[in-house]
Amino acid sequence: MAGGTYGARVSDTATAPPESHRDLLERPLCGHLATVRPDGAPQSNVMWFVWDGERLRFTHTDQRQKFRNLAENPRVAMSVPEPGNPYRYLEVRGVVEDISPDDADASFYRSLQERYGRPLPVRDAVHRVVITVRPTAFVAEG
Amino acid sequence: MAGGTYGARVSDTATAPPESHRDLLERPLCGHLATVRPDGAPQSNVMWFVWDGERLRFTHTDQRQKFRNLAENPRVAMSVPEPGNPYRYLEVRGVVEDISPDDADASFYRSLQERYGRPLPVRDAVHRVVITVRPTAFVAEG
């Protein structure tokens, strides 16, 4: 935590998430996704995600700025805080490996709605894409 | 929320925070600060901050990567979620206007410890800096 020195600082950079913080990827939590805009300025947005043990996947539409950012600069970072204790969090840095259209039913988007307990009518299936991120580093804090 | 379409999407871009989300800057909440590393990749870290009505201020040491990032690329973005409801959040984008040493007692750092209710011994006063960010845009979600 950049605010100060809170006893031992757990920190790990590796190609697999540290055991101590893996739950933050497996639970249906919200991540704060940093992307870089074409002018070099960062952007930070709350995102759903799913972790399959090797890759992060996000649902998005192809209509918004974040999609355009990723088309130009595929590097991302996401920090996922423990609900109720933001001092414990996992940062995942990575690279967009693939952006593909969701299927006609927006099945991937619907699977995330289910994961997060928020089923809603899908009105933008034709614009839904699946963004796959390959992690390059994990940094655990707290 | 980039995960989906949750009814009306509140969104506002302006030079002052939208009234509806100003509390997220005034309360002692943790922000997720996106900075850009010298190689162009983003980084996302949980940070304390204080808002004086016009500027965001952060405490940091001059010893870490985030400080070096800001020296090279002063643009930042911070998303601050409502505790218990990450779908309601405020994103502040801005530019680092000033980085100055904290005083010999690390008074600014101590004032943030007090704001966040975490008084701790200060062992790095000589390295503590105050980072001042001028907002350029506010985006309210949820």
Image (tube, coloured by chain):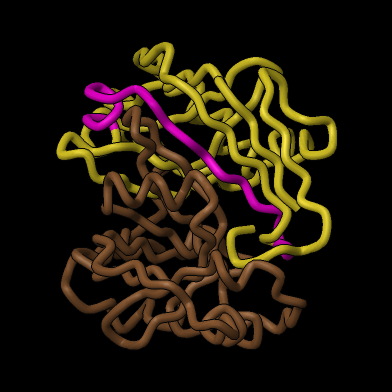
Chain colours: A yellow, B brown
Name the one closer to the observer, A34 or B103. Answer: B103
Q: Is B71 placed above or below B108 here?
A: above
Q: How many marks?
A: 0
Residue B62 placement (x, y as % from top left): 49, 57
**Which percent across, then down, holds residue A50?**
61, 29
Q: Where is residue A108 in the image (x, y as percent from the top left)?
A: 51, 23
Q: Would you say B97 lies left or right of B87 here?
A: left
Left-right relation of A122 to A22 = left
Comparing B112 with B71, the one in front is B71
Image quadrant of residue B25?
A: bottom left
B12 above or below A108? below
Q: In this view, does A58 lie above or below B126?
A: above
Q: In this view, does B125 lie to the left or right of B70?
A: right
In the rendered image, the quadrant that contains the C terminus of chain B is bottom left
Residue B10: x, y in percent? 30, 65
Residue at 60% x, 66% y: name it. A3
| Residue drawn where x is 44% and y is 30% of the image | A59
Give B95 or B2, whichever is nearer the viewer: B95
- Specify whether residue A72 is painted magenta: yes
- Residue at the (16%, 70%) spot, across then down: B14
* Visible residue check, residue B12: no
- Read off the magenta span: A67-85
Report whether residue B135 is seen. yes
Q: Is residue A132 above or below residue A8?
A: above
Q: Classify residue A141 as left or right of residue B65.
A: right
Q: Would you say residue A68 sits in the magenta stretch?
A: yes
Seen at 26% across and 63% down, the residue is B11
In the figure, residue B110 lies in which quadrant? bottom right
